[in-house]
Image (spheres, grey):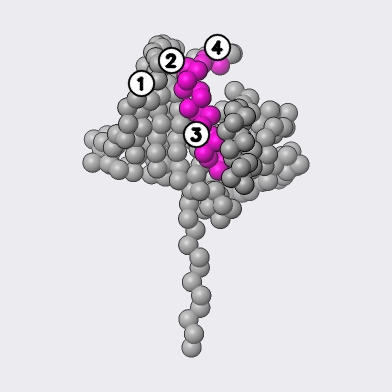
Amino acid sequence: MAEPPKAATVRRPYVLLSAAVSVDGRLDDTARERLVLSNRRDLDRIDGERAAADAILVGARTLRRDNPRLLVTSPELRAGRVALGRTEHPLKVTVSGSAELDPGLRFWHSGGEKLVFTVDGALPRACRDLSPLAGVVSTGPTLDWGYLLDHLGRHGVERLLVEGGGTVHTQLLAQNLADELHLVVAPLLVGEDQAPSFLRPARYPGGPTARMKLLEARPIDDVVLLRYAPKDRS
């Protein structure tokens, strides 16, 4: 008797986390207007990372607070993507356990294709409010990052750029799902207890003594880019 065919193995995207922090580890201050931590040259570098990505992901809190467009801003980089047979802008992805996202946010009305991942309990709301603007996918009863990455992999996403926020970065690092971390340190001290921090308390792989491999440390004018391999720990 012939054996049943084996299920095709899903290749998950290469997951790159990107964040800029103050010297005291804050992603922003508590003012209404966003605190810009990166400098001009570093923002150009980030634009290059967006152009190299197949998808860009941010959490719902980041969408609500910053109202980003998440586009490739350089005309040359966009033209380069098109020349390779790609879309001008990567797929834009967000994650929300409540689906409480304003349909008027700039995220939905610029760039190309969008996806929102949610959970079963919020799926009716997501379909009602967001399905005219984006594809809607539930990961099940709870947020399942493995399911999310498998779904993106099945749909051709090979490189995923994650731009925050802190909760998203924490969950991906705690679940050992990040392949690379780009952390830019800006010469600023926020000094506010309620300012959002880069990471939350969590049980990270290997515990507090596990050292990630440093891939690069590079000054970019007055900021420093640190590149780490989170899965390569000693």
Residue 31, disc: 4
Which residue position holds label 2?
193
Q: Give the mark toward the camera: 1 or 2.
A: 1
Alpha-carbon span between mark 1 and mark 2: 28 Å
10 Å crowding of disc 4: few (<14), some (14-19), many (20+): few
Alpha-carbon span between mark 3 and mark 1: 17 Å
The quarter of the image holding the C terminus is top left
Q: What type is the residue that disc 3 sits on? A: Glu
Q: On screen, 208 above or below 176?
A: above
x and y percentages locating residue 77 in the rendered image: 57, 33
> In the rendered structure, does residue 222 fall within the stretch colored magenta?
no
Q: Do the residues under discs 3 and 4 have CB atoms within 8 angstroms?
A: no
Q: On screen, 18 above or below 179?
A: above
**Towards the viewer: 170 or 52:** 52
> In the rendered structure, does residue 42 fall within the stretch colored magenta?
yes
Residue 219, disc: 1
x and y percentages locating residue 170 in the rendered image: 43, 35
Q: Do the residues under discs 3 and 2 have CB atoms within 8 angstroms?
A: no
Which residue position holds label 3?
49
Q: Give the mark toward the camera: 3 or 2.
A: 3
Alpha-carbon span between mark 4 and mark 2: 13 Å
Comes first in the chain, label 3 or label 4: 4
Q: What type is the residue that disc 1 sits on? A: Pro
Q: Do the residues under discs 1 and 2 have CB atoms within 8 angstroms?
A: no
Q: Which residues are magenta?
A: 34-56
Q: Do the residues under discs 4 and 1 have CB atoms within 8 angstroms?
A: no
Q: What type is the residue that disc 4 sits on? A: Ala
Q: Residue at x 53, y 29 (%)?
A: 47
Alpha-carbon span between mark 4 and mark 1: 28 Å
